[in-house]
Amino acid sequence: MKTLQFREAICEAMSEEMRRDESIYLMGEEVAEYNGAYKASKGMLEEFGAERVIDTPIAELGFSGIAIGSAMNGNRPIVEYMTFNFSLVGIDQIINNAAKMRQMSGGQFNIPIVFRGPTASAGQLGATHSQAFESWYANCPGLKVVVPSNPKDAKGLLKSAIRDNDPVIFMESEQMYGDKGEVPEGEYVIPIGVAEIKREGKDVTIVSFGKIIKEAYTAAEELAKENISCEIIDLRTIRPMDYKTIIDSVKKTNRLIILEESWPFGNISTEITYQVQAQAFDYLDAPIIKINTADTPAPYSPNLLKEWLPNSEDVVKAVKKVLYKKS
């Protein structure tokens, strides 16, 4: 094993795949000369040249469409958005072309493309730069949605995403790029659509993904001091979702908490709640609890932002509630 930052794991995944397959290239804002807005493409321009690491104008609709057309003609583009908030400018291309082209062409065109970049909040960036888009894109058939939470998963999942013959939305976090973690030395991939139990437990299941899962780890450590055992599942992939891992865990613990950095209405937590009550209702010993952001646009003020975001204290309170213990 070696230790890499999240950004380095992303860079390694892209570079290794580009060495393996000349049809793969990277395009996006500041990916080349500036080495990426978050330095996730550091050194790639020097290695692969300007024909395969391409700086684009600030025109997401345009370069998203160019990449989709390129994918239809045999290439495998990686499109980086400086933030998925900016993908709203290109969402018509993603939803109405990338996601639908295979069906509309009767299977004549695959769209092997990865759209990647940071999602959700990243500190004091204000309401228009702090939105979580996982549920938006997961709502659309034809797209796969991946949200890794650590360098090892990021590298293995990104390699799988690049090799996939369908469009993949690959979501990161500005606040995770500096995170360090162990990554295998050799070649490896992690299959899309497979969740992982990050911590074994017997009293309650906590499901989460992306950077907010760190709050679940912190809460689990605190609760362990009171002999409360939490099982933590990292979804890793939002669509297709690994329902089986969640259901099997709930059948063991009989309680479920879902921690998600998103608005409360119509999100991933809502979908999981429905599936669990449909498939494992008789195993539940307490109502399912969803932990989300406040139902408002993200504030700028740091004290308000702290209140807006879910945290480990929220998780601790929720766990004690489903266990019918006093906080």
Image: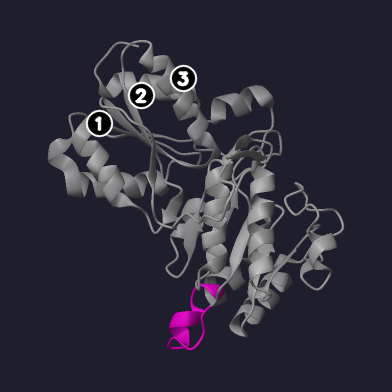
Q: Would you identify the image quadrant in which residue 138 lies?
A: bottom left
Give the crowd class for mark 3: few <14, some 14-19, many >=20 residues within 10 Å.
some
Residue type beneath disc 3:
Glu
Q: Which residue is mark 1?
A: 255
| Label whose residue precedes the other's in the sequence (3 or 2) | 3
Residue type beneath disc 1:
Arg
Q: Secondary structure at mark 3?
A: helix
Per the model, the C-alpha gap separating discs 1 and 2 is: 11 Å
| Label whose residue precedes the other's in the sequence (1 or 3) | 1
Q: Which residues are magenta?
A: 98-110
Instruction: Give the image location of residue 314, x and y in percent.
Output: 44, 23
Q: Camera-side residue: 181 or 76? A: 181
Q: Main secondary structure of the magenta part?
A: loop
Q: Would you identify the image quadrant in which residue 203 lies?
A: top left
Is residue 228 toward the left or the right of residue 62 in the image? left
Magenta segment includes 104:
yes
What is the residue that sits farthest to the left in this orientation?
282
User: Which quarter shows the C terminus?
Assistant: top left
